[in-house]
Image (tube, grey):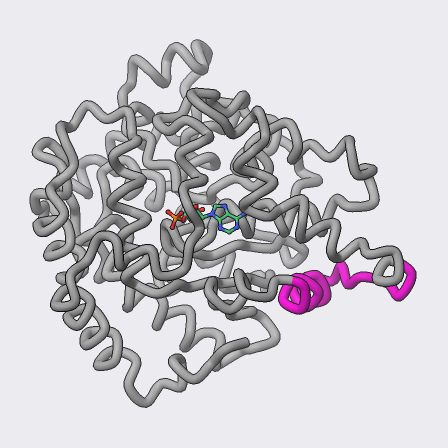
Amino acid sequence: MEPDKTLNDTTATATVTDTAPTEFEKNQKRYQDTIAKLHHQKGWRPKENLIEFGGFWWQQHLLEGLLHAQENFKARPEDFLVCIFPKTGTTWLKALTYAIVDRSRYDDSSNPLLKRNPHEFVPYVEIDFPFFPQVDVIKDKGNTLFATHIPYGLLPESITNSGCKMVYIWRDPKDTFTSMWTFLHKERSQDGPVADLDEAFDLYCKGMSMYGPYLDHVLGYWKAYEENPKRIMFLKYEEMRANPVPYVKRLAEFMGYGFTADEEENTVVEKVVNLCSFETLKNLEANKGEKDREDRPAVYANSAYFRKAKVGDWQNYLTPEMAARIDGLMEDKFKGTGLLQHDK
Ligand code: A3P
């Protein structure tokens, strides 16, 4: 997730492009007029609003990006989408899908993932597409990989109609919250400090977080997966973290880039898994300290995307009562859906 609030600042945009207005800029005022009429509510920072649209909560710039993507994003059947709620494994899946698709172009030491952050290779539909049409990966018609945090029911029609495939990954809501709250502290934000843990947790449980409610986000993709399992692959972070190789093999196959017997014999699957592992990526120069992505401005340093990747780290943040509250919400929401039994 890359909630770049500066994107919405016309001065910042002008210094980036400094040319004729982009398609997005031509329409931005219209989006803002639409958004001004929606329900706004205080978000996780004193000067940040969350806006209700389509049953989900949005930050202003992400909602402008969504409206633009809904009107203009043209998915093709050959495209592949990483669909995901923030902090549930976006960076990992971006790295994996890129490493899978481009594996024949690079040897072990020349893979671009070793030099740059995975977010530079798989652009967001509602962020890079509207706000950064000038970056190479958006201009490159040969690129077929995209990512999005958009809930299933609000995806641009071209995505649902094109037949392109998607992968969705979800994660224990307690770790997802912990990951999000700690991540937001690393944002170079001008909207004031992040709400304290109790307040942020209460908002999260009420569904009020960017792209929330989280459980509805998961459920939307789960139902779409059940209706069409050939089109959507459904993964669980904890399962994949414990044993990535079989999932990565299946992911490659699902994407149409299955590993050959020769590749398997030559441990190419393990190499892809290792290249994209938390431990490898976190320790690269590109993902350390205050290094920023190279392709465009961002409000997070690359290192912000790599914290602990530890299943159950919520225990260092949440009380047993908080855990029981969210577990109860999850059980109610997912009761009878088969989701809690699904471990593939
Ligand atoms: P933690 O905050 O629990 O450490 P996202 O990529 O959707 O923003 O999610 C970030 C979470 O995924 C963070 O979790 C981060 O540490 C973890 N993560 C980042 N890269 C990963 C990788 N290659 N494998 C597994 N987890 C990873």
- Magenta residues span 245-262
Q: Is residue 74 visible?
A: no
Instruction: Give x and y (percent) for residue 323.
Output: 20, 67
Residue at x-position 23% and y-position 61%: 213
- The front one of 85 and 138 is 85
Residue at x-position 41% and y-position 60%: 311
Residue at x-position 35% and y-position 39%: 65
Residue 27 inside the magenta-drawn segment: no
What kind of secondary structure does the magenta stretch mostly adopt?
helix
Q: Is residue 65 left or right of residue 204?
A: right
Instruction: Give x and y (percent) for residue 325.
Output: 15, 70
Quadrant of the image occupied by residue 253:
bottom right
Quadrant where the N terminus sits is: top left
Quadrant where the C terminus sits is: bottom right
Q: Is residue 334 above or below residue 250?
A: below
Residue at x-position 53% and y-position 78%: 228
Q: Is residue 67 visible?
A: yes
Instruction: Give x and y (percent) for residue 315.
Output: 26, 59
